[in-house]
Image (cartoon, coloured by chain):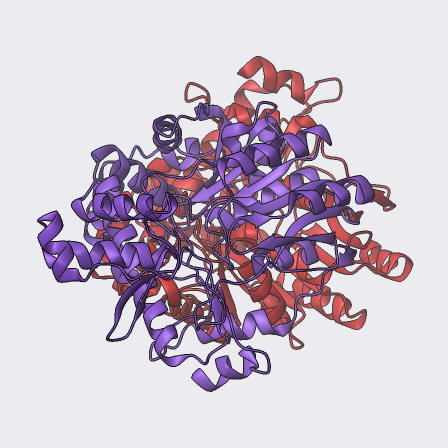
Chain colours: A red, B purple
Amino acid sequence: MKLYEQLANSIAQSIHEGVLSRGDKLPSVRQTCKSRNVSSSTVFRAYYLLEARGLISAHERSGYFVTAGSTTGSPSAPDPAFSVNPECKHVDVSELVFEVLESIRARNVVPLGSAFPSPLLFPCNKLAQAMASAVKTMDRWHSVDNLSPGDLNLRRQIALRYMIDGLHIQTDEIVVTNGALEALNLCLMAVTRPGDTVLIESPTFYGALQSIERIGLKAIEIPSHPKDGIDLEAMEKALQLHKPKACWLMTNFQNPSGSLLSDEKKKALVELLCRYQVPLIEDDVYGELYFGNKRPAPAKAFDTEGLVMHCSSFSKCLAPGYRIGWVATGQFSKAIERLKLTTTLSASVPAQVALAKYLQKGGYDKHLRNLRHSLLLNQINFIKAIERYFPTGTRLTPPQGGYFLWVKLPDGVNALAVHRMAQ
Amino acid sequence: MKLYEQLANSIAQSIHEGVLSRGDKLPSVRQTCKSRNVSSSTVFRAYYLLEARGLISAHERSGYFVTAGSTTGSPSAPDPAFSVNPECKHVDVSELVFEVLESIRARNVVPLGSAFPSPLLFPCNKLAQAMASAVKTMDRWHSVDNLSPGDLNLRRQIALRYMIDGLHIQTDEIVVTNGALEALNLCLMAVTRPGDTVLIESPTFYGALQSIERIGLKAIEIPSHPKDGIDLEAMEKALQLHKPKACWLMTNFQNPSGSLLSDEKKKALVELLCRYQVPLIEDDVYGELYFGNKRPAPAKAFDTEGLVMHCSSFSKCLAPGYRIGWVATGQFSKAIERLKLTTTLSASVPAQVALAKYLQKGGYDKHLRNLRHSLLLNQINFIKAIERYFPTGTRLTPPQGGYFLWVKLPDGVNALAVHRMAQ
């Protein structure tokens, strides 16, 4: 662990133990340099990290104050829970999603409209080397045998990463897909039929709504808090009332709210769904992008019955545009593999072989560390800018990882109008 | 045109004009060498070509005889038309398709079970160069801009090829997909809803049945002849009776029968479907693989209303495993583009950029000429082997291009049992 992370953790502990209380001013950077015998840059980075975790907050010209994530009324006050009416609904996604997606093509505006990171944050040269080597040395027969479920070396590398995170996923359980979006769609198709109902969180990733609409399913929205995610009590009521065929949600640094389910909550979620024998489609594309000390576990880690389909990809962490994702299929491997075969046959073979080579060579974890750091700094800069320029009454909860910062504008401000003016 | 093609065409003309009649023995190779002043290899290749076109046939130790495609009873007699009961059916594809697909992974048997060509027939080195150059020089922002409808350069190259074939397809009309299979599936989803009926040919590409089953559609089978394809009279009756929402078929060198619709028939097909305002999903992945003098037109060439969705790919002609296909969408571009966005987002960007580079550099047509020649020789060799080893009563119609040779075994022979014994 780096020095600034150690320092941040030590201060965080003081806050949790009540040594530092809400509203307390932190020692100045200069004081802390002296008392801890560290450089000012280490102190700044530690404070930024604590700020990103929502534990402290900077007040211009007067220093850092403990917020412990619960001040209200100030510009970056944490967001309250979302409330929704958990009724069964047919889904009809408006033109809005496509309008916002289209806007991200303009390079002269910051693309806040969708979850595309700056392409400059990825190891393009190393990937190019891996790809050049892949296509030059690739066994020609791979164009036949690397069809669904996917390139064996890549599936082994993915299984290895699960193993490092303490999950025992068999290579055979992994189906390679065209990005996580296809993985999620295949899972949904595997366990539902038109007319069925599906549990989703509110707010949810717009892609889930589009899939539900396309397949002709009905959605039941379960309220979710931007800090710790879905409301399990509301979910249990919905399970009893609506007998859904699946639950689709994002456990780590959710799109769009940034919420993170704790390990305890993930365990409770999986147990609850198992009790009702409802499969979980877990979208975990941001799990590697934590700002804390370790990767948060997926809900899949608590699955003893193979009811969790864990979907992820390299699009958010390593290789956007390569369109390589996967699903750890649990008990649904045969259905998912066949759906993949009959819809798009297989993922692009050169991309699969190239990523397997890149992972085999090593360097992914170093890249991830840099990426996390850049994303954390991004978040800090955005929070600072929001504090400075956004009106009083703006609310946000800084997430502990990922790409998202859910900002609630004060009453009376039309977010769509702001979006259109910003283009 | 090559010398052996000229010679073959000249002999073919003699047959069509009645100068040579059915049963006539052709001049020996030696005689023809002398009379035409060409090498024996030219004569052999010309005779092979004529044999492949079903115009002549070799009888061991006695030379070549004119068959004009109409002898019966001999081992390679042409196949009669398929007859089906054109009733509306729910589709339930058996385990058989998956069993046969699985069998192609074994490298120690000739993979007759599915339409995968030998990977040795493709320009792997040139593709590897294009890919290495693509990933090294690729604009990093392409990972964002090259989402659906696809890489602009690639779509331009595809539009250019249409133009060379005399079709005016706008770049904007083209949506790049993960192979033709995804293109076909997106088209089907764009124009149908669960419960709708769709016209297909019988026998049909198994992928069409799988898609119809997955989406929950009903299929109406229209009989198709292995020589000239679908029966338009039967189709008109089905159009009147069942009011289908789409027609899905393969116009050139169909999988599995090898049938080819003539230009006149394609025109009549499009006119018929336009009269009933039924969209045509045209699967044309084998069109480039003609053994004759020019690429057979797609039905899309006769479409004046944008009712034809023309699907193709590079998987059968250039780059298997890259999973790059496309659809010329006609009037359905918005729906198809959006379905692509919400199901798999986009095709692999490096593969798109690499193929655009390969096409831009030139050499594709030369590769295609070699590929067609290899496929023709393959067909000739298979026909020879079938004539030698298969029992009397075996029937086939040599197609004029593509990968397929529809062989009808004599009554009493169980093809599936033969397949299983051959593994």
| Residue farthest to the bottom, as pictured | B421
Q: What percent of the width, then of the height, locates residue B209?
A: 64, 58
Considering depth in this image, is A66 or B383 the residue closer to the camera?
B383
Considering depth in this image, is B405 or B388 the residue closer to the camera?
B388
Is A402 above or below relative to B264? below
| Residue farthest to the right, as pictured | A241
Residue in view at x 85 percent, y 46 percent = A86
- Is B421 left, or right, of A244 in this rendering? left
The quarter holding residue A269 reads bottom right
The quarter holding residue B202 reads bottom right
Is A165 above or below relative to A49? below
Is A411 above or below relative to B364? above
The quarter holding residue A358 reads bottom left
Q: What percent of the width, then of the height, locates residue A226?
A: 67, 43
Which of the image's four quarters has the C terminus of chain B? bottom left
Which of the image's four quarters has the N terminus of chain B? top left
Q: How many circles with numbers are drawn on the protein?
A: 0
Res. A67 visible in picture = no
